[in-house]
Image: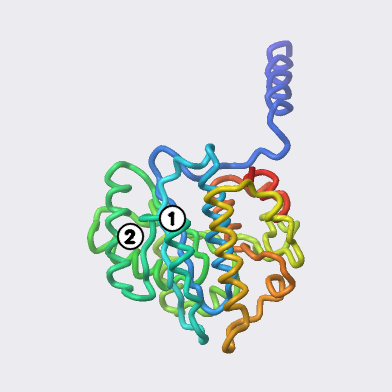
Amino acid sequence: MKANSSVLLLTLVVFLSIPVNAQQTLFDFEKDLLLVQFDCKTDVDDIHTMAALATLLSNPEYSSVNYHAVAGTYGIQEGLYVPPNDVMQLAFGDHWSDAHINPEKALNEVLDHVKETISKGGDIWIADAGQSDFSAKLVRKVQAALPDVYTKNRIHVVQHSDWNESVTTPELLAYLKENTDYHKIPDGNAEGNGTPGFRTPGYTEWEDTLSEGHIKEVWKLAVEIGNTYNAKDGRYNNEAISSGGLDFSDLSEVCYILGLQDIYDSREFFDRFAK
């Protein structure tokens, strides 16, 4: 009984020492690759998400993340494209590909990053900030190039939107779910559902919260482009953005991957990462 009591006491001490908001970090910072893929059609929220991702990756705690971004990874939805290239270039430099202009070239560029990561023992984490057509085509290329790799264990896909799933080519979505470790998380457009809620109408304090410098310039450009194309020529009217607020809801998937689900909303994100 005395030995059992000691074990119980030790277990209780360990349990109480774990922070209440402790999150599981799925990403291996030493080996893994983060792919963030933006459809940019027809909602301008992706433009804000690019700026938010750049903000997160500029933080010293996350600046070592091995990442690559892709623009134009849309599925079968109708509507006009939102030109993101100026923001992508300013935010990510050489760490991005353009699947809108040349999808095959983009797939091959990303495949090279995937092959290098897997050869070093790392896994692939895909945040689908849009539909999953590009992801499925990428997995097919990986299986053809690396037939000995079991993609169900090595490639992880995170999706937060029912709508994104509904406008992904059905057979490609089914293939992706069958051949990867597919995670469907709560929608990042809402707060208090277990993932951060980054769609915030009327939120204007970001400019005062951000320190002067490169990231602030990225945000200024993202907001400018978002305002320019929001609801223009039949594009989706993002009411959070038309109200002067922000919508970077797709970043909820990156937060899931990096163990940051405890962030509640946009204000808390900027308080934590903007300084």
Helix, strand or loop at mark 1: helix
Please state the horizontal and vertical placement of residue 183, each as a whole percent of the image.
Answer: 53, 59
Q: Which residue is mark 2?
A: 110
Q: What residue appears at the point 68 percent right and 18 percent down from the top-left corner?
A: 7
Left or right: residue 89 versus residue 235 is: left
| Residues at marks 2 and 1, CA–CA distance in whole angstroms | 15 Å
Does residue 139 lie above or below 167 as drawn? above
Which residue of the protein is positioned furthest toward the top in this rendering? Answer: 2
Q: Position of residue 195 (x, y in %)?
A: 66, 55
Give the residue at x 34% y 64%: 139
| Nearer to the camera, 226 or 79 | 226
Q: Amino acid at mark 1?
A: Phe
* Residue 178, position as x, y percentages in the image: 42, 65
Quadrant containing the C terminus is top right
Picture quadrant of residue 250: bottom right
Q: Is residue 141 above or below residue 66?
A: below
For the residue marked with disc 2, what is the amino acid? Answer: Val
Q: Which residue is mark 1?
A: 92
Which of these two is toward me, 222 or 50? 222
Q: Which mark is residue 133?
A: none
